[in-house]
Image: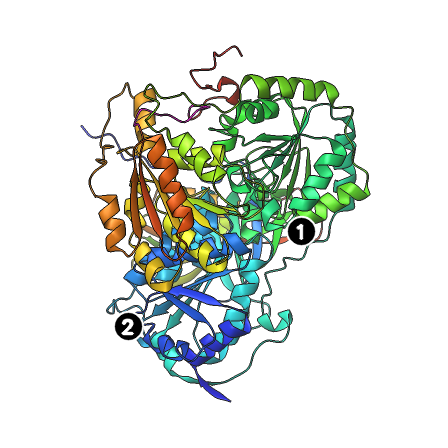
Amino acid sequence: MKLTGAQALIKSLEQEGVEIIFGLPGGAILPVYDPIRDSSIRHVLVRHEQGAGHMAEGYALATGKPGVAMVTSGPGATNIVTPIANAHMDSTPLVVITGQVASASIGTDAFQECDITGITMGITKHNFLITHADEIPRVVASAFYIATTGRPGPVLIDFPKDIAQSEMEWWYPESIEEYDLLGYKPEIILDQSSIDEAVALISQAERPVLYVGGGTLKSNASQQLIAFAERTKMPVVTTLMARGAFPDSHPQHLGMPGMHGTYSAVTAIQKSDLLISLGARFDDRVTGKISAFAAGAKIIHVDIDPAEFNKVKVATVAVRSDIATALAAFDAAKAMPKNLDPWWEVLTGWREKYPLVYAPTDDPALLRPQEIIEAIAAASKPGTIVSSGVGQHQMWASHFWKFEEPRTWINSGGAGTMGFGVPAAIGAKAAMPDRDVWCIDGDGCFQMTAQEIVTATSEGFPIKVAILNNAYLGMVRQWQEMFYEERFSEVFLDADLPDYVKWAESMGAVGLRARTIEEMHEAIRQANEINDRTVVIDFRTPASEKVFPMVAAGASNDDIMVHPLQEVKN
Amino acid sequence: MAPEPFLGDVERTPVTHHILSVLVENKAGVLARIAGLFARRGFNIYSLAVAPSEGQARFSRVTIVVDAESAPLEQIVGQLNKLINVVEIKDIAPKDALERELLLATVSVDNENRGRVLGLVESAGASIVDVDADSLTLMLAGTPRACDELERSLEGFAEVELHRTGRVALPRLTKSEEN
């Protein structure tokens, strides 16, 4: 069967089980947009290529399946660089297809040419430039294999226009051997001696902590983690990337560690004698000052990527494994720490003394951002998916939404990409049309990618957006207030510019505004009743509200600042 | 007055260097992938030699002398291994490595210094590979140290154009004191 390169690309994507592509056409990718019309794959037309990338990420984070985005060459390709970098930092499986100018024009500064494989070398797990139409099936199959196995990540396929227009005899790889990936061997043979050493360390532990990272979600190991934690009685902390991997309602959950972690999670790690890292990477936002991080703890580092071992902290025992396999091995070896009752007495004391709190407003009618999130959570169905942008609202969402299920928290962790929330929510909604999807956003973030609400409207992905509008780039403002003597510099945005309600309406959404507690409950009620249109609520919140607890950048986690309402006595 | 441009902590040979002999798929951009990885992770490359290797056009052998003080060797190897086109990495510790490098130098000579140059060539074990009326080109294939020494010896001459290839290495068959 003879196919054009463009047809072969689409057919290859069908072979990989792709259901949906987020994209935007242009000159170099034009040939591929013709066979899409005849494909079973749904194409979602975005309004900006960055939106396509974040939607693909939202889809991938909600499902665990690879997200697919397709854009044209040059500016189309560079516009999707941010989502690629974001996916790389958070190990999200993506396959991004970029059009490229014709092979003969590469290197001539042709119209809309750019070296996107060069640009994305450092922010993809791998990238390909297709050089012959016969290679299309192999490259596409390899791209999905690389994106989804081992430590997942983004893979980019650069596709020259002439190859899309040339002909090939259709074939498709039938086995991994035919992928021709001589240097990629993601299969892991578990080293039992590392398990034995880890189990021996656990048996000596009096103050262990399970430090759960995003790898636990990637490994679909939540149920195993719950069983393991309950059997061993060990306390659990979940990083920003792992929220939902362990239920917030579980009595053994201490919350999130790190710069804005809960006092009990941060301090439990600091005072632990054994830190068991499950798919976490000792990010600086978790460790604070590294030399002071968990200084008295031995470390069991479980990760699928051996390059993470000893990168930041030296592991006492490194276990190269996915989390599900490692937990099964720990269980098989009957890993069990010492009696943890004394440890739990201390932990419970911290938890009771320093819960997450916020100050009531002087005027009871006025809104606090934290209570908006609590109110939305309280009014939401189980299984509701929450996305966020990056900043104060993101931290509050992580604090005050109670996550009970894996893959219900869609967020930009490592890269900290403002504007992630709206398109990621749309991608999650596309993946999970029966779930409610809320985007908890900031006013600064919303302005970066709000145009994708047009996509949500036109493509029928109704999401609910809560803008916590404090008229500022709030997290930067917080740092300027705390560390730059309140010299506010370039952070004021104006609560009324733009008019978020009118903007929402102009994009086909329902726009609401809430300034008081009463209006808040009414707006949330309305939003939850509207399921055929996107709803945007402009919640007015005070600019002075700050995220606590906080560990200052570069400081030791021992120097955690709790909320001013909670006297510091540590 | 502007400060002198910062040139980094330049050293002839890093104190703790390691040789990574890396077999890569001979695909477009693979060298850029390796160089880019070193640059973005802050690993220092001291020298780099690349040539097609084992199995016709399929593979290349990249010999990288790394500064193991710029980053732990385990990190460098771990990150390199993640490059999809990297097939195999052999880490050769300096004491176990048989290292060789090629040096080519064209030196301006006159009746006065010709004898000194020829003396250097002979004592270094180098050879003359090209000559004309007022210059000669010499070649040394030898240990990096021998190349260092010859390079230093030639520094005293007025006009020298000197190129070195960067070293290649194989594991020693027998342990020896000579390096």
- Residue lying furthest bottom in this view? A1
Q: Which residue is mark 1?
A: B172
Q: Is residue A425 left or right of residue A286?
A: left
Where is residue A437? Give x, y as percent.
Answer: 45, 50
Front-most of A234 and A130? Answer: A234
Q: Is residue A457 magenta?
A: no
Q: CA distance from mark 2 to mark 1?
A: 56 Å
Front-most of A170 and A528? Answer: A528
Where is residue A212? Give x, y as percent.
Answer: 61, 38
Numbered disc 1: what chain? Answer: B
- From the viewer's perspective, is residue A354 above or below residue A414? above
- Residue lying furthest left in this view? B1
Badge 2 marks a residue whose secondary structure is loop
Q: Is residue A405 left or right of residue A513?
A: right
Q: Amino acid at mark 2?
A: Gly
Q: Amino acid at mark 1?
A: Arg
Front-most of A119 and A333? Answer: A333
Q: Is residue A364 left or right of residue B76?
A: left
Q: How many marks?
A: 2
User: Is residue A23 in view from this perspective?
Assistant: yes
Q: Which residues are magenta?
A: A542-552
Q: Quadrant of the rendered structure where residue A75 is?
A: bottom left
Q: Are marks 2 and 1 on the same chain?
A: no
Q: Nearer the viewer, mark 2 or mark 1?
A: 2
User: Local crowd at mark 1 within 10 Å, few (<14), some, or many (≥20)?
Assistant: few
Numbered disc 2: what chain? Answer: A
Q: Which residue is mark 2?
A: A27
